[in-house]
Amino acid sequence: MNTSLPQQVKIVEVGPRDGLQNEKESIPADIKIELVNRLTAAGFANIEAASFVSPKWVPQMATSAEVMAGISRKPGVIYSVLTPNMKGFEAALAAGADEVVIFSSASEAFAQKNINCSIEESIERFRDVALAAKQNNIRLRGSISCAFGCPYQGEVAPASVADVVRRLRDLGCDEIDIADTIGVGTARQVQNVMQVVAQEFPLHSLSGHFHDTYGQALANIYASLEVGISIFHSSVAGLGGCPYAKGATGNVATEDVLFLMQGLGIHTGIDLNAVVDAGQFISTHLGRKAVSRACNAIAAKRAG
Ligand code: HMG
Ligand code: MG
């Protein structure tokens, strides 16, 4: 084991939100609830369970209030939801969310496509959400899309990512996600961006949110570990894609990340076998194989 890597990491399971938001067929709330419950039982400390966005923009998330009301919560587990504006925040508050996520972008073009406003306007919109979160003792997380490349504008300068990190920090974010929305980042680039943004925000509260479109996510996670990042987002069974990033595939699969961490001797507190079961459960419902090498390998081994 390389002793310079973090000895413990937090894995934020984003499958129920990022993973499912792009599914075309409406998934019944009880399936989403069972998925969250299985993930809770597997030992995650943080699950991104729902999203209070406009149902016209993301129809699959229209059941979010029902999902939040139906899940069995384990004390200490943080159930996060996306909140692009005050309307979303009010719904999140009513649903008893533990953490709200405000989300912008390092690329102007993507901000327009995803949240229908400029980066500057998004920050202004988040000001009230941030204040309300603090007043209600709800954790506040910020997410920055297109930190390593944009489907509309192409290259994104690390300075643009750092600029949004600064603005989210000034709003009082407890944690900030550096997101590779379209999975184009590569290892050295990831290390460079992480080191640049770590000058603006504590390293231990920065997370890596990697989509696996170009197959680089695990390498990017390892590269991030090398520069001290210790929070990663992943999606059970590799579910997902962003409705406003054409061709983008899911987040890196949780099972693959857990297998990597096990091999490195890095503690996650999560039961890989239980995550495989959850992955099989949702994949069966969706009628397709999990997009996770580890999930499929473990399931095949079990089947003998
Ligand atoms: P807009 O059309 O500019 O907003 O959308 P508006 O204020 O004019 O409202 C339009 C309608 O939406 C109104 O309804 C509002 O009431 C309603 P109408 O009067 O027409 O019937 N509305 C809402 N309904 C429910 N909840 C709300 C809400 N807000 C307005 N919170 C808006 C602006 C931000 C609302 C819209 O663009 C939106 O919802 N965007 C979200 C898009 C999204 O969810 N994308 C995926 C999540 S982000 C992601 O996946 C990236 C991430 O994973 C990191 C990465 O990988 O990059 C986080
Ligand atoms: Mg994402």
Image (spheres, rainbow, N blue to C red):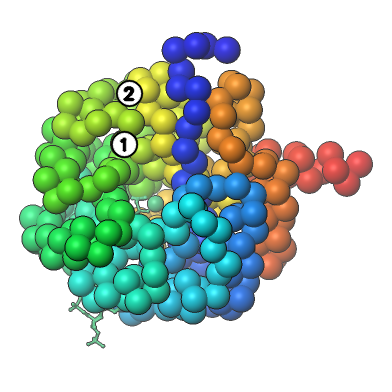
Q: Residues within 10 Å of mark 1 (few under 14, many from 20)?
A: some
* Labelled pair 2, 1 in contact (Cβ < 8 Å): no
The verdict on label 2 being within 8 Å of ligand 1 is: no
Which percent across, then down, holds residue 54?
Answer: 31, 76
Image check: 276 left or right of 60? right
Q: Quadrant of residue 115?
A: bottom left
Mark number, residue 205: 1
* Residue displayed at 45% across by 59% down: 79
Dot in front, 2 or 1: 1
Say which residue appears at 58% left-offset and 51% top-offset: 236
Name the image quarter holding residue 255.
top right
Q: Is residue 199 visible?
A: yes
Q: What residue sits right under mark 2 in the picture? A: 191
6 in relation to 272, above or below: above
Mark 1: amino acid: Ser
Residue at 48%, 52% (x, y): give it. Answer: 76
Q: Is residue 51 above or below residue 298?
A: below
Q: Position of residue 248 (x, y in %)?
A: 42, 51
Q: Is residue 22 visible?
A: no
- Element under label 2? helix
Bin the neighbour count of mark 2 within 10 Å (Cα to Cα): few under 14, some 14-19, many 20 and up: many
| Mark 2: amino acid | Gln
Which of 273/211 is in front?
273
The residue lying toward the viewer, choosing from 165 and 112, is 165
Residue at image point 54% right, 63% down: 73
Q: CA distance from mark 2 to mark 1?
A: 16 Å
Is disc 1 placed on a helix, strand or loop? helix
